[in-house]
Image (cartoon, grey):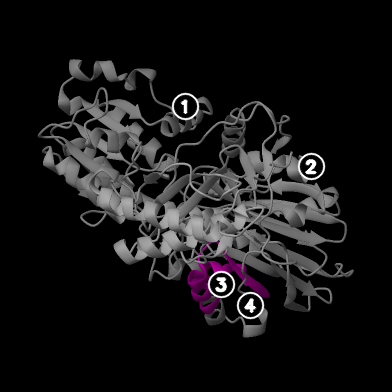
């Protein structure tokens, strides 16, 4: 259902006119807000938003393979890639990205799936590498647009997808087929197999597509399990599969490949967390990502061993822990978990609290504890808080505020700069080099990261023997083809649609850039609304204009400014309407906007959105 457009006119701060906003300023971003569950009805598509005309793509020639990264190669998040061969399309992952400073007011950012929507009859399945939201979060918003294809993934990821789908009762049930590593499934004329990878969540896997010209390998997110830079025997055995195989193409995780050496192994984090759980004399509060399931399970197991009871705070963390318990991945007694009302009945050294919010999220459990708004948990002297996470870029100030609030109340804080209490789930440079040597592809495309990360990964591929013309560094919507039956790789001049597609409340679509700009300016400089009643016959004001200001000035302390603004409005309207018969009220509003915006900037050096409302009587 297309959203109706409003016809009112807004003038910009420099006097330019648009239909909903005004500035050519760059987009800005904010932090995630809690997920809103839509009502049991179809989400409507928001109109507009494609930046310019898309050049039509040429048809896929026989013997060519097309790879289209729809998301995840200009950012961290919204991972989704389409692979097309003959009459078949295979999709790898279907994630979303949390909003940030460039998209104020948006819930999530999705991959642009117009390419798939136009070819939905060719899609043979969506293959999901693991259960993190940047790989599964887009499914409820995208699946109906591309014809409800079968979803293939492992057990834990399957349950996480189904659990999330419960929040979207208007959608049809998903067709999910659970697979295991080493299993082979047929997808049209192609075969797809899977291999184990190490990540921060169980059941993570890489995906291998068998083509007539060789294997196409998609690693998903991964790191290596290693001991002092030597990969474990399990890793050696897993990657030994590729030793005698003809690997045509590799698309691999780039997130941490700029970091030197090997990443901190999770075994090191486990040892440190075990020691902290044993030696901490008082209450222990651990803040981490709810998606860090491997770590959460190890913490819970150790807490049970030493006799600490566990309180879980945070909806997403509770849901994920319940899932791994249900699947038998976490085997602990139910008695190890307590409710918040039991906190006061236990000695402090017998309590461990697991909480979301280590990023300083305003509404997450740990921040509510820090700012004293949590109903049950209050920080007291002797508490130890472990921040078992990295700081997501952009969250530095929020995390610092979190630490300040906790320490003011007497908490001792342990974080990754003091001790190895967090390890990333992504491979560092030397791990990435090792992976390339083991897989040894003919062609390479970096995935999962900002452009700079992809470039660094491309340099690693060159160090492993790939030449410049065997590597493609993509953008979202880039169309890459392996041509001449696997003999060369090229990037076409044409792109698939790649404008931002967003979830905004109950609407999904390619939001017009002016809407984002208006939100940015409203948050920075506010708005100034003028309501004027004009005699349509004489063009004279019936009374002094009313003025409403939000986020710009405090009206009670700016009466002189307001009075001057009223005088300017009156003079502008009467000068503009003089001699007009009938009065052109659009022209009147334009002139009022220009005059008032100019005056406000001269007096305040601010550029609020000026909205004139002229009522003809």
Residue 247 percent coordinates (x, y): 70, 68
Span shown in magenta? 433-459
Quadrant for residue 354, please give it. Answer: top left
Could you say whether the residue bearing mark 1 is in a helix, strand or loop? helix
Residue 112 percent coordinates (x, y): 67, 55
Q: Earlier in the sequence, mark 1 or mark 3?
A: 1
Q: Earlier in the sequence, mark 1 or mark 2?
A: 2
Quadrant for residue 330, please give it. Answer: top left
Q: Residues within 10 Å of mark 2 (few under 14, many from 20)?
A: some
Q: Earlier in the sequence, mark 4 or mark 2?
A: 2
Q: Is residue 142 left or right of residue 600?
A: right
Disc 1 from disc 3: Cα separation:
39 Å
Q: Which label sits in the foreground, 4 or 2?
A: 2
Q: Earlier in the sequence, mark 3 or mark 4?
A: 3
Residue labelled with disc 4:
471
Q: Which label sits in the foreground, 1 or 3?
A: 1
Q: Are marks 1 and 4 in contact (CB under 8 Å)?
A: no
Q: Earlier in the sequence, mark 3 or mark 2?
A: 2
Could you say whether the residue bearing mark 2 is in a helix, strand or loop? loop
Could you say whether the residue bearing mark 4 is in a helix, strand or loop? loop
* Rendered-image quadrant of the C terminus: top right
Q: Residues within 10 Å of mark 1 (few under 14, many from 20)?
A: few
Could you say whether the residue bearing mark 3 is in a helix, strand or loop? helix
Q: Earlier in the sequence, mark 1 or mark 4?
A: 1
Q: Are marks 4 and 2 in contact (CB under 8 Å)?
A: no
Which residue is more in the foreground, 6 or 440? 6
Residue 295 percent coordinates (x, y): 38, 42
Based on the picture, tell me whether residue 236 belongs to the magenta stretch: no
Res 348 label: none
Q: Which label sits in the foreground, 3 or 4?
A: 4
Residue labelled with disc 3:
437
Residue 382 percent coordinates (x, y): 11, 35
């Amino acid at each position: 259902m297309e959203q109706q457009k409003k016809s009112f006119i807004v003038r910009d701060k420099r006097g330019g006119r648009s239909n909903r906003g005004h500035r050519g300023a760059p987009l800005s971003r904010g932090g995630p807000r809690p997920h809103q569950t839509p009502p049991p009805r179809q989400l409507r598509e928001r109109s507009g938003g494609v930046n310019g005309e898309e050049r039509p793509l040429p048809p896929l020639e026989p013997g060519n393979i097309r790879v289209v990264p729809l998301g995840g190669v200009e950012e961290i998040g919204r991972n989704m890639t389409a692979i097309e061969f003959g009459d078949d399309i295979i999709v790898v992952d279907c994630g979303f990205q949390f909003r940030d400073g460039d998209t104020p007011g948006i819930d999530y950012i999705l991959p642009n799936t117009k390419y798939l929507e136009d070819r939905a009859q060719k899609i043979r399945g969506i293959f999901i590498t693991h259960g993190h939201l940047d790989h599964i979060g887009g499914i409820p918003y995208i699946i109906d647009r591309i014809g409800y294809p079968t979803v293939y993934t492992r057990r834990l990821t399957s349950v996480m997808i189904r659990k999330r789908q419960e929040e979207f009762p208007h959608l049809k049930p998903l067709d999910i087929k659970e697979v295991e590593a080493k299993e082979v499934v047929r997808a049209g004329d192609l075969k797809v197999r899977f291999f184990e990878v190490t990540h921060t969540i169980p059941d993570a896997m890489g995906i291998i597509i068998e083509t007539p010209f060789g294997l196409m390998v998609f690693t998903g997110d991964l790191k290596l399990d290693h001991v002092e830079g030597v990969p474990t025997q399990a890793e050696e055995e897993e990657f030994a599969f590729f030793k005698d195989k003809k690997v045509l193409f590799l698309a691999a995780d780039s997130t941490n490949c700029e970091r030197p050496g090997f990443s901190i192994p999770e075994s090191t984090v486990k040892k440190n967390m075990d020691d902290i759980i044993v030696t901490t004399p008082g209450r222990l509060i651990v803040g981490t990502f709810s998606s860090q399931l491997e770590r959460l399970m190890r913490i819970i197991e150790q807490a049970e061993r030493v006799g600490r009871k566990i309180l879980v705070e945070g909806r997403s963390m509770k849901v994920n822990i319940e899932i791994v318990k249900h699947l038998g991945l976490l085997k602990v007694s139910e008695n190890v978990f307590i409710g918040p009302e039991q906190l006061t009945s236990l000695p402090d050294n017998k309590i461990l609290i697991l909480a979301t919010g280590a990023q300083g999220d305003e509404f997450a459990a740990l921040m509510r504890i820090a700012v004293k708004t949590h109903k049950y948990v209050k920080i007291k002297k002797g508490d130890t808080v472990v921040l078992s996470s990295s700081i997501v870029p952009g969250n530095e100030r929020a995390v610092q505020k979190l630490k300040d609030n906790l320490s003011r109340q007497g908490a001792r804080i342990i974080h990754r700069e003091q001790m190895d209490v967090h390890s990333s789930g992504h491979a560092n440079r030397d791990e990435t080099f090792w992976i390339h040597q083991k897989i040894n592809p003919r062609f390479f495309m970096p995935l999962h990261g900002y452009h700079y990360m992809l470039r660094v990964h491309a340099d690693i591929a060159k160090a492993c023997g790939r030449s410049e013309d065997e590597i493609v560094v993509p953008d979202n919507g880039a169309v890459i083809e392996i041509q001449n039956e696997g003999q060369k790789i090229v990037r076409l001049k044409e792109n698939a649609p790649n404008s931002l597609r967003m979830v905004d409340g109950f609407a999904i679509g390619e939001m017009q850039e002016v809407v984002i700009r208006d939100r940015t300016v409203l948050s920075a400089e506010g708005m100034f609304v003028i309501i004027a009643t004009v005699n349509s016959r004489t063009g004279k004001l019936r009374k002094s204009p009313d003025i409403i200001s939000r986020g710009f000035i405090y009206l009670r302390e700016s009466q002189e400014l307001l009075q001057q603004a009223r005088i300017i409005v009156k003079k502008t309207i009467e000068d503009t309407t003089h001699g007009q018969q009938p009065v052109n009220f659009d022209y009147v509003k334009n002139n009022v906007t220009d005059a008032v915006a100019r005056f406000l900037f001269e007096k305040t050096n601010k550029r609020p959105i000026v909205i004139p409302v002229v009522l003809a009587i």
